[in-house]
Every structure is written in C-alpha cells, then in structure tokens.
Image (cartoon, coloured by chain):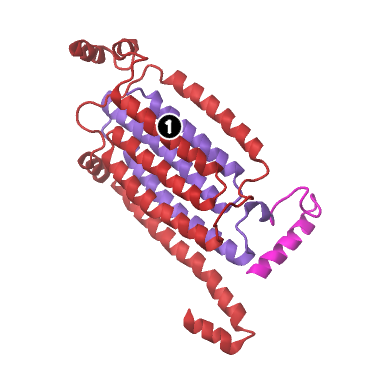
Amino acid sequence: MTSAATLGHLAADSTTAAAESQGFLSPTGVEVAFLLVGLVTFGAAVVTVTTRQLVHAALWLVVALGGLAVEYLLLTAEFIAWVQVLIYVGAVVVLILFGLMLTRAPIGRSPDADSGNRWAALTVAVAAAAALVWVVVDAFRTTWIDLDGPAAGSTAVTGASLFQNWVLPFEALSVLLLAALVGAIVLSRRAKANHVTEAGRPTGPNGSGKDGVR
Amino acid sequence: MHLAYPAVLSVLLFCTGLYGVLARRNAILVLMSVELMLNAVNLNLVAFDVWLSKAAEETLHSGQALTLFTIAIAAAEIGIGLAIVLAVHRNRGTSDIDKLRDTAEGPDGEDPGTGASATGPAAEKAEATA
C-alpha cells in the first residue's frame, strides 16, 4: 500500500492520482491535531477582537500566537516556531501590555472598545472570509503537503538558506531594525522634551527640578 | 497534510484581524488586530514553503526566509506604533481613533468643501500640540 502511494506520488504530484491515494475524508493524525489547534487558535483570535476587557484581549492574543507556533511545529518548521514564541509571545505581547498600561488603566470592562461601525466591519469580514475560503479550497482541493522525510524548516536548513541566498535582505533588515529603534526613541523623546520646556518656562525652579529628575 | 487546512486557517485568522482593525476603537487593539493579520500571512508563507520545498524542489526556502523578515518587521512596527500611540496619548489624552479627526473631511468638520477653513483649526491644533 505504501509503495502504491509512493508510486502515485512519483507519477503525478498533486493531481487526481495523489488525491485517490490520500483519501479526501480520512484525515491523518497530523491533520486532526492541526484542526484542533487551529480551532483553539481561531477561537482565541475571535475572543481577542471581540472582548471588551483590554488586558484580556492581550492575553488571548498570547493564546492565538502560541497556537500558531504549534501549527508551525506541525508543519515541521521548527525554527520559525521558536522564533514565533520568542519574538511574538515574548516581546510583542509584553510591549502591547506596556502600551495598554501606559495609555489607560484598563481594569474592568471598557464599554467603548468597539466602534459604531462594527456591523459594517462584520459584514466586510464575513464576506471576505467566504470569498477567500471558497477561492482557496477550490484552488488547492487536490494538493497535499508531504510532511514525511527530513524536516523542511529545521534550524540547519533555515540557516543555510538564510545565509546563502538571503544575506543582503538580512543585512538590510538589521539596518531597518536600527532605524526603527532610533525612530522609537526619537518619537518618545521629542514629546518629553517639549513637555519639559513647556512646563519649565513658566515655573522655573519646579521645571528645573523636573529636569533633574528626568 | 491537505494544503487546505493551513490555507483556510490563515484566511479565517486574516478576516478576524480585518474585523478587529475595522471595528475596534482603541489604537492598541487595532495594533493587535494587525498582528493577527501578519500572523495569518506568516502561516500561509510557511505552509506553502513546506509544500513547495517537497513538491517543486525549491531550495531557496523563500517562504521561511520571508516569514522571518515579516516577524522582524512586525517587531519594528509594533515598537514604532506604540511609540506613536503613546505620543498621541500624551498630547491629546486619548488613544481613541474615532476622536482623532483633525484631518477628517465630511459632516464632522465645520465646512466640508472649503479647504482653507478645514486646514485652519487643524493647523491651530497642530501648533498647539507641537
């Protein structure tokens, strides 16, 4: 049976022969795991965009991003999965939580979290989802990912391709990160410097005292 | 694995982020929805890279390299975005997108149609906050 499957693969990849050998309504274990984790991820994403408690939204975003990291692991992209955990769950969500804490005290429910045009937004989102799901399922109905064999996204493979073929974009990206760092510092400092000068001009000693503190 | 599984999940996550961007009012919640959309694109890139690396003998691994670049750019984007949101919050006292209508045209302005009167209060506010 396995030889027949491999023969089907060799004869015509991602055609009807492969479709008959794979079976449409008999999901494998990886597919079942992908489906379950995908349901958790999608549910967490929906709660993220609909909950009225801002901190809870950020924490559900952690669940959604962690579920995506598990999906990357199931797709044999290990390095991307751990980068996802490190950067998104580790850095981005912490930044978002800091931003929430600094802009408002988000304890409890905030009834003005949703805009007035949420029904129009829901219509647009559902229409886009229906159209895209129809197109994607119709286009890739007979396409299977071959997850057997060596992992397609192990650290060795990713590092080799990144530093053999993608060195110039990689270095350009480091310049971009530096620019973003400088830009964030400038954006934060300009407002603070203006604040200090505005507060410092009329009230001399108090403003200088604030200067010393800052 | 059927390719439709990650593709459909990516579509659903993208449309969830689209709803969040359109329906949320707090700027930081909008940024979180943008992160969801970026992650949907990342999942698509990884799934198609894994498929093509086996099916088409594609050795560049462009999908995974672009995913790494997208993650780094998303980190930069969230840093800059939060700096902007904090600066706006410090100047205006709110991070509510519906209230930041200085450059808006339409029925909320005083005179929709005359450019001079529309730029007048906006310029005054810009000077006041600068």
Q: Residues within 10 Å of mark 1 (few under 14, many from 20)?
A: some
Q: Quadrant of the N terminus of chain A?
A: top left
Say which quarter of the image contains residue B10: top left
Q: Is residue B120 magenta?
A: yes
Say which quarter of the image contains residue B38: top left
Q: Residue at x 27, y 24 (%)?
A: A146
Q: Which residue position holds label 1? A: A39
Direction front: furthest residue: A108
User: What is the secondary structure assignment of the residue under circle 1?
Assistant: helix
Number of callouts: 1
Q: Residue at x 32, y 52 (%)?
A: A171
Q: Position of residue A190 (x, y in %)?
A: 53, 70
> In this orientation, which residue lies closer to the viewer: B82 or B70?
B82
Q: Position of residue A89 (x, y in %)?
A: 38, 49
Q: Residue at x 38, y 30 (%)?
A: A36
Chain drawn in red: A
Residue A201 lies, with reference to residue B45, above or below; the image says below
Direction bottom: furthest residue: A205
Q: Is residue A71 magenta?
A: no
Q: Position of residue A106 (x, y in %)?
A: 55, 57
Whether residue A128 sits left or right of residue B46 in the image: it is right
User: Magenta segment, which residues?
Assistant: B102-130
Q: Amino acid at mark 1?
A: Leu
Q: Position of residue A102 (x, y in %)?
A: 52, 63
Task: Indicate the chain on which mark 1 is placed.
Answer: A
> In this orientation, which residue lies closer to the viewer: B75 or A115?
A115
Chain drawn in purple: B
Q: Residue at x 57, y 47 (%)?
A: A52
